[in-house]
Image (tube, rainbow, N blue to C red):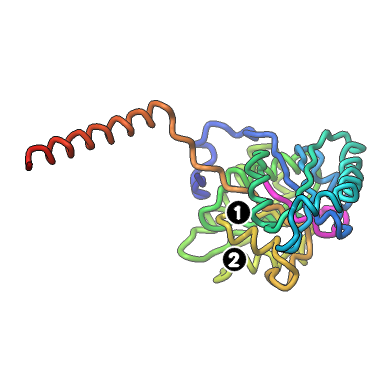
């Protein structure tokens, strides 16, 4: 369920970061992709899950891929994990051989309860971070993640409200700005801007060339397909900087009492239908 970005953060009654952020980092483990050292430092406050994956041809069984490549994949993932451990972080690692990258990334993100998924593009020192605020994304989680990663640093943050579809971007970024300040951010580190866009996902990813890291909300399946697509498919000819995609919160599970009540109502309706059918015979 997404939080309305125009809601006053003071009304929430809880200005603390509500969860230790957990970042899932999918890595094309047999293609030499790694996590740059500046990103390791940037992500140090978070819990990390490194997902080493390799996409197999459709005709190749995953069991065969595992037998053929698992040792190489494990060695590469262990090297990435060691960099995080050297920075003082305990991390979780997984290795997957798959025919469908997007489906695998989403499944693992669900399993580990990831706050965000990282596209680990090459990166220098992280000094300027773009936070894109658009539509009905989960802005509360977006701000939580930014605060958790950056509140004790000196990186500059640009809150960019993406206008479109009648969305009040100006109010949204003002609320996000106020929330960051209430969570301990120095106001001098925050810049606020808005812009019109008919294709917000494409335009956000295009701006990765201007910043060291981009943080954006998921807002639906197309985002992951866009930023994790093949080179030919990647929007704006490919994201240049690392991109953190903050995942939407799942809808709350139905409680047992609610489920029982729903089942009871259904049973009552069934009984009424049965009685009605009997009366007509």
Q: Main secondary structure of the magenta part?
A: loop
Question: Quarter of the image holding residue 32?
Answer: bottom right
Q: Residue at x 85, y 48 (%)?
A: 70
Q: Earlier in the sequence, mark 2 or mark 1?
A: 2
What x and y, as percent, mark residue 148?
71, 39
Residue 34 vertical position relative to residue 209 in the rendered view, above or below: above
Q: Is there CB contact under 8 Å for labels 2 and 1?
A: no
Question: Which residue is identified by label 1?
Answer: 218
Quadrant of the frame with the C terminus: top left
Residue 78 vertical position relative to residue 18 in the rendered view, above or below: below
Magenta span includes 118: yes
- For disc 2, the neighbor class at 10 Å (few under 14, some 14 to 19, many from 20) is some
What x and y, as percent, mark residue 214?
72, 57
Magenta span includes 57: no
**214 sits left or right of 12 in the view:** right
- Mark toward the viewer: 2 or 1: 1
Judged from this view, the residue extending furthest toward the top is 257
Question: Which residue is identified by label 2?
Answer: 200
Element carrying mark 1: loop
Q: Residue at x 80, y 41 (%)?
A: 93
Q: Residue at x 52, y 57 (%)?
A: 135
Residue 257, labelled with which disc?
Answer: none
Q: Residue at x 11, y 37 (%)?
A: 278
Residue stretch in magenta: 116-128
What x and y, as percent, mark residue 108?
68, 45
């Amino acid at each position: 369920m997404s939080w309305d970005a125009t809601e006053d953060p003071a009304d929430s009654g809880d200005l603390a970061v509500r969860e230790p952020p957990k970042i899932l980092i999918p890595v094309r483990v047999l293609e030499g992709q790694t996590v740059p050292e500046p990103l390791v430092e940037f992500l140090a406050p978070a819990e990390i899950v490194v997902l080493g994956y390799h996409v197999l041809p459709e005709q190749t069984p995953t069991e065969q891929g595992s037998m053929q490549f698992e040792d190489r994949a494990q060695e590469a993932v262990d090297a990435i994990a060691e960099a995080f451990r050297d920075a003082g972080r305990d991390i979780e690692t997984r290795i997957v051989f798959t025919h469908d990258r997007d489906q695998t990334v989403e499944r693992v993100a669900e399993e580990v309860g990831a706050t965000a998924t990282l596209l680990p593009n090459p990166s220098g020192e992280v000094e300027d971070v773009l936070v894109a605020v658009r539509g009905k994304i989960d802005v509360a989680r977006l701000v939580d993640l930014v605060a958790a990663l950056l509140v004790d640093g000196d990186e500059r943050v640009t809150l960019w409200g993406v206008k479109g579809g009648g969305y009040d971007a100006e109010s949204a970024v003002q609320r996000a700005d106020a929330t960051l300040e209430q969570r301990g951010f120095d106001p001098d580190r925050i810049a606020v801007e808005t812009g019109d866009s008919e294709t917000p996902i494409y335009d956000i990813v295009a701006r990765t060339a201007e910043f060291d890291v981009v943080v954006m909300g998921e807002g639906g399946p197309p985002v992951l397909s866009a930023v994790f697509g093949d080179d030919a498919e990647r929007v704006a000819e490919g994201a240049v900087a690392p991109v953190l995609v903050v995942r939407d919160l799942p809808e709350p599970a139905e409680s047992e009492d609610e489920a029982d009540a729903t089942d009871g109502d259904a049973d009552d309706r069934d009984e009424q239908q049965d009685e009605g059918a009997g009366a007509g015979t």
